[in-house]
Amino acid sequence: MAFTIPPVAAPAKQLFSLVGKTAVITGGSGDMGFTVSKYLLQAGASLALIDNNLPKLEPAASSLSEWYKTYRQENNEPEDSKQIISSWACDISDVAQVKSTMEAIRKHHAKPLDVLINTAGYCENVTALDYSPLNLKRIVDVNLNGSMFVATEFARTLIADNHPGSVILVASMSGSIVNHPQPQTPYNMTKAGVIHMAKSLSAEWAKHNIRVNSLSPGYIMGPLTKKVMEADADLGNTWMSRVPMDRMADPSEFAGPIIFMASDASSYMNGHDLVVDGGYSVW
């Protein structure tokens, strides 16, 4: 029996390419945002980095620019004058700031935007009974409302330009499971909200050719995690004992999933929560 092989739509390298695309990354000076940005540059994207800490963001953007210049020289890659890096101060919990920042990014880059990667957010390990109402409001404003604000203002620019795009909201495995032993109910509930937000927006915006998905990382070995583990070795050992791979993720290990979600390689993926947790949630 003969099998009919469908034609290849595009070479694999082209499927994962971000050449000519502009990616907006919130939390641009954070571990994940900064690390993933290096891979986005290699994939060909221009970057608009957003962070509420401009003194930290501007050096990060300059460092990325210098790193990429050296990378191109070492790999004999020609410089692309159209590939740029910009940085923007913005508190994503403030919708007015988000709106003006997104509009400014669109104007500065002088072309339709293509990809949003919302990595901004934070966690606090405090029991529910001890969590202050003020802190609760703040974490909801940043993690949940902030995700909504950046997603909607980004989508407005795409709809105005009649341009397709990909929205990637960074959630967490904590949106689907309860971490042990640390108490973090407010964080968990905001990330659960982000996961369902992505699903809901994906249904609303599909008619505009805007895909919306979420990424749910497991534990990441960054400076803050290292500090926690140095202060409490037993806690770190407990975390790792629950990961089948017996280790935490390096921030660079999320570059592949994000490039997949941002590129044409995932063109039919919409409303999905991609869990990348080393197997933590299978137990």
Image: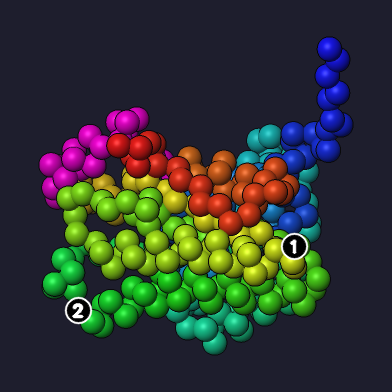
Q: Quadrant of residue 151?
A: bottom right
Q: Nearer the viewer, residue 73 or 257?
A: 257
- Disc 1 residue type? Asn
The residue range painted magenta reads: 231-251
Q: Is residue 94 magenta?
A: no
Q: Is residue 55 visible?
A: no
Find disc 2 in the rendering and name its residue.
132
Residue farthest to the bottom, as pictured: 96
Find disc 1 in the rendering and name its residue.
209
Q: Quadrant of residue 48?
A: bottom right
Q: Is residue 112 visible?
A: yes
- Disc 2 residue type? Ser
Secondary structure of the residue carrying tag 1 is loop
Which mark lies nearer to you, 2 or 1? Answer: 1
Q: Position of residue 47 (x, y in %)?
A: 64, 60
Q: Residue 204, relative to residue 222: is it above or below?
A: below
Query: In the displayed structure, does residue 107 sit left or right of residue 38?
Result: right
Q: Residues within 10 Å of mark 2 (few under 14, many from 20)?
A: few
Question: Which color scheme does this rendered protein use?
Answer: rainbow
- Please give the name of the residue rendered at 63% of the width and 41% of the height, measured from the top-left corner: 71
Query: In the displayed structure, does residue 240 sit left or right of residue 190?
Result: left
Q: Position of residue 145 (x, y in %)?
A: 45, 76
Secondary structure of the residue carrying tag 2 is loop
Q: CA distance from mark 2 to mark 1?
A: 41 Å
